[in-house]
Amino acid sequence: MIVALHSAPKGFFKAGPPYNTDDLLRFVQKAASLGFKAIQIGPLRNFVSIEGERLRRVLDSLNMEINVHVGGIYDAKKFALTEEGYVAAQKQIHYGITLCKEISSTLVSIHPPFFTARNKVNNELLSKARARFLQLLKAEIDFASHSRIKIALESFCYSPFIFGGLHDFAKFVSEFPSEKLGVLLDVGHVYQAGIDLYEAAHVFKHRLLNIHIHDATLEKDYRKATHLPIGKGTINFPDLIDLLREVGYEGWLTLEIRGSEKEIVESKKFLENVICRTP
Ligand SMILES: [Zn+2]
C-alpha cells in the first residue's frame, strides 16, 4: 500500500475553480515536494482544458503515478429525466477516460448520481436514474476497456445517492465483471453513514481498486463530520490497515482531506508508520 494525494492543501489554489494546466502542474509538483509518489486528479469539473501530454511529461520527470477522478453526477433527477443531464454526465465520463488514456493511466473513478435537496424522490424517479446510470456505465466501460482502462464506482451507498445500502450497491456493481468495474471505497463517508467498515471491505474485496482516506466522526452533518485530517475524527486507522491487509488490498490510500499542508503531511506520515509497523 502507498499513500497517494487527491486533495490540495487548504489555500493552495489561490482562486476558485476552474483550474488550468499550469495550476494542475503546480499541484503535481507540490505533491512531489511533500513526498507523494502518486496522485489522483479531479473532480474534472474543477479543471479546464488539461494538456495531457504536458502533464505526462511532468509526471515522468517526477516519477509519479496518476489516476483520474471524474467526480459526480450532481443532480440525479436532471440526469434521469432530461437528455441534457444525461449527455453532460456522459461527456464528463468520456472525457475522463480519454484523458486517462492520454496520460497513460489505467483507472478512472466516478461518483454515483445523487439527488439534491430540491429533488422530490419517488421510486419511479429512483429506478429511472439507476437504469440510465446502468446504460451509461455499460457504454463507457466498453469504451474504457478498449484502452485497458478500468472504472471504479465510489462507494456512496446511502441517501441521497441512488443506492439504498451496501448490498444494493454491491448488487448494482455485480452487473459487470470484476475486471471491468471495481469499487473506490471511501472510508470516511462510509464510516460517517454508519456502515460497518469491516463489512464494506469484505463485500467489496474482489473489486477494490482505490481507497479514499479521510478521518470522520458519526456526527449527522457530513460537511463537518468528514474529510478531516487523520486523528481529528474517530476512525481507527491501524485497525483499518489490518482489515485492508486481511482482504488482500495492495493499492493506494488516497488522501482526501480538508486540511493544511502540515495536516496532509502528518496524515501521510501516520499512515506510512502504520503500514511499516504491521507485518
Ligand atoms: Zn471520496
Image (spheres, rainbow, N blue to C red):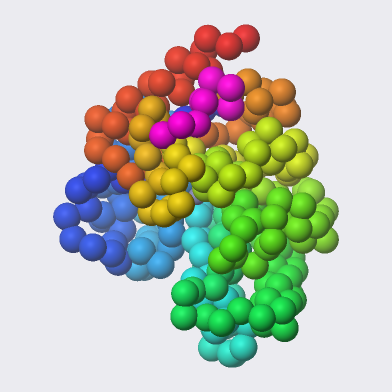
Q: Is residue 147 visible?
A: no
Question: Which residue: 56% across, 66% down?
Answer: 160
Along the horizontal axis of the image, is 217 left or right of 159? left
Q: Position of residue 245 (x, y in %)?
A: 67, 23
In which quadrant will I find the C terminus? top right
Q: Determine the residue located farthest toward the left in the rendered image.
A: 14
In the rendered view, tell whether residue 193 sits above or below residue 241. below
Along the horizontal axis of the image, is 261 left or right of 154? left
Res 123 quadrant in image: bottom right
Q: Position of residue 90 (x, y in %)?
A: 59, 75
* Magenta-colored span: 233-240
Along the horizontal axis of the image, is 52 left or right of 81? left
Question: Which residue: 56% across, 60% down?
Answer: 111
Question: Which residue: 50% across, 16% down?
Answer: 274
Along the horizontal axis of the image, is 80 left or right of 123? left
Decide whether residue 234 is among the magenta residues.
yes
Q: Is residue 272 visible?
A: yes
User: Foreground: 29 or 264?
Assistant: 264
Decide whether residue 251 is among the magenta residues.
no
Res 5 quadrant in image: top left
